[in-house]
Amino acid sequence: MPEYAFIGRSNVGKSSLINMLTNSKSLAKISSKPGKTRLINHFLINESWYLVDLPGYGYAKVPIPEKKKWEKFIRRYILNRENLYCLFVLIDIRHEPQMADLEFMEWLGINQMPFSIIFTKADKLKPEEVEGKVEDYSAIMLEKWEEMPTHFVTSVVTKSGKSEILDFIEKVNKN
């Protein structure tokens, strides 16, 4: 069955977004402490496809050997999973583009992995600030990319972006 995986820096809102998309408060375990998700968690949706919650990368307070182990099994999952239809790279829209995110997306491009960007926590900024942050990100991406990957702006508080992401997944599943 098709899989749609969520990855991003620790505490970007991966599990919260999965809960929003599935109308659940506790399907994916959330925490204010970075590094709560430590395994690859699959959630079957409508008996026909999976949402996949991957551990975050970045600043989780875990020993370096543990981080290296996560990185290895995440990269193996991404490169070898034939039914991974799209990887959603989550980015906290409040921050300037982070080198870890840019390098990770470049690695995805080099390995020809289909991905989309999901900007999270849009409710924390004014609408014009959100637009400016997306434009800033686009400018940096377009220095190396021919076009900006498909992207979505979301907020789990206001539920914005939910229908757009679900419509995208439905469209990909039909194709």
Image (cartoon, rainbow, N blue to C red):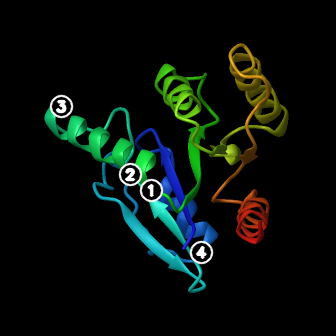
Report the amino acid beneath label 2. Answer: Tyr
Query: Gap between marks 2 and 1, in whole Å?
Result: 6 Å
Out of 118 and 115, give the one closest to the viewer: 115
* The C terminus, quarter of image: bottom right
Name which of mark 4 and mark 1 comes first in the sequence. Answer: 4
Is 121 positioned to the left or the right of 70 in the image? right
Out of 164 and 159, give the one closest to the viewer: 164
Query: Gap between marks 2 and 3, in whole Å?
Result: 20 Å
Query: Gap between marks 4 and 1, in whole Å?
Result: 23 Å
Report crowding for label 2: few under 14, some 14 to 19, many 20 or more residues within 10 A (C-alpha): some
Residue 111 sits above or below residue 103 on the image: below
Give the labeled residue for mark 3. Answer: 64
Disc assigned to residue 22:
4
The residue lying at 24 percent from left, 37 percent from top is 67
Marks 2 and 1 in Cβ contact (< 8 Å): yes
The residue lying at 78 percent from left, 23 percent from top is 146
Report crowding for label 1: few under 14, some 14 to 19, many 20 or more residues within 10 A (C-alpha): few
Name which of mark 4 and mark 3 comes first in the sequence. Answer: 4
Report crowding for label 3: few under 14, some 14 to 19, many 20 or more residues within 10 A (C-alpha): few
The residue lying at 55 percent from left, 28 percent from top is 110
Give the labeled residue for mark 1. Answer: 81
Q: Please identify the quarter of the rendering in which residue 64 is found.
A: top left
